[in-house]
Amino acid sequence: MHAKSPETGDSGMFHQPKAVYAVAFACVVSFMGIGLVDPILPAISSQLHATPSQTTLLFTSYLVVTAVAMLVTNAVSSAIGAKKTLIAGLSLIVVFAALAGSAGSIGGIVGFRAGWGLGNALFIATSLAVIVSSATGGFAGAIILYETALGVGIAVGPLLGGLLGTVSWRGPFFGVSVLMAIALVATVLFLPATPKPEHRTSIMAPLAALRHRGLLTMGLAALFYNWAFFTMLGYAPFPMHLSAIKLGLVFFAWGILVALFAVFGAPNLQRRFGTAPTLYVALGLFAVDLAIIAIWPTNRTVLIATVVAAGIFIGINNTLTTQAVMVISPVERPVASAAYGFVRFIGGGLAPFAAGKLVEHYNLHLPFALAAVSAVIAAVLLSTAHRTLAAADRGMDEDGHRHAGDDAGVAGEVGDELGGAAAAVDDFEREHDQSTIRG
């Protein structure tokens, strides 16, 4: 991203209200949520006498609940306001992360991760809106802060999980609870009351939005892509047979590549080649990467190398698919974000558990082979919307209307650790480029 906004100088980025830093810090911790548990999965499985498939339910409960909650978070936020929704989400994360750390059984952790997922859904539905509305740097400063939080959270999550996991598998859960408690107190103290939206969002609006062909096609493609993604993320730690800290380092390297290619690589590739060609190639290479794992799943060197390299393709896919959805959809961004999030998180939530069951009943090769096929299916589905994706590159939605990237629309976009709010970043890039041309 650009270090300097066209609106504010470099100093504008760092002179923000305390409320902005409080929410940005909470974003960092929230974005750690997925990668944080990877290094401790084998330890939880061993110490709680759980099978890998039972342990992967930590992903399933978290993501499936997040998916379902996405259907109602906009309705909640529009009813009680952004600040109260944000505080409710942070409070749930603090409580359920601590409960997960104190649990004595795999069932307990899985259940508490579900509560964590509900809190996460409430938080990510409003965090970007609060940053955009509160940042003194306006749109540009808010997006730079969001990108910084995204990159730091994705990269640091696995490393923190590995470091705390060397003490105990409970460490990462308690660590998140403490960090989020700090963010919660800061948010309550420093964030001023936020006004309620002018109109309430219907609970049924996200489901109704899936009637739009472009949004539904992108959602289904994301479902298959996230099946591939979370098969790797949720099950690859088991055959590596590494300690928590070594697993943390592996996924730290993976997270660095995800962040770099999400923030820098994807926008540059999109400008040079277009959204559709870039996604086809990235998904194709991801399928090849997964196929290599499927062939040699017990070769530790191959497994580590392919998992780390997957960060490149995941970073590109996460950003460009989410970005395209926000432009393609003819409905409001909050509604489009919720509909798309609901579909994609379902795929991500079910995949790790299915992978564990396939290994138990068949062999270690099958889940990764299925993941490779899923990545190919995602590319095929995207190809059916090729013209729509090309139109999105020109700023047109699927109904042929020009997309407007105003601050209010961006504020409604969901920002999360899987590439959410990418279109907000794209709007900032476009605004910066136009300002440079005018200058």
Image (tube, helix red, strand yellow):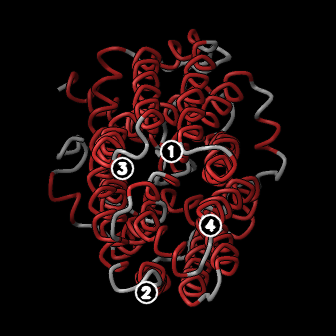
Please tell me how crowded label 2 is: few (under 14), some (14-19), or many (20+) other residues with Cα within 10 Å. Answer: some
- Give the mark nearer the N terminus: 3 vs 4: 4
Decide: marks 1, 3 in contact (CB < 8 A)? yes
Measured from the top left, where is residue 67 in percent x and y? Answer: 69, 53
Distance from Cα at disc 3 to Cα at disc 4: 41 Å
Residue 50's place in the image compared with 414, above or below, is: below
Which circle marks residue 178 in the picture?
2
Which mark is in front, 3 or 4? 4
* Residue at the disc numbered 1: 410
The amino acid type of the residue labelled 3 equals Ile
Q: Amino acid type of disc 4? A: Thr
Bin the neighbour count of mark 1 within 10 Å (Cα to Cα): few under 14, some 14-19, many 20 and up.
many
- Tell me where residue 369 appears, x and y as whole percent: 55, 32
**Residue at figure coordinates x 54%, y 45% from the top left:** 364
Q: Which is more foreground, mark 2 or mark 1? A: 2
Q: Which of pointers 2 and 1 lies earlier in the amino acid sequence? A: 2
| Residue 290 pos. (x, y %) | 45, 34
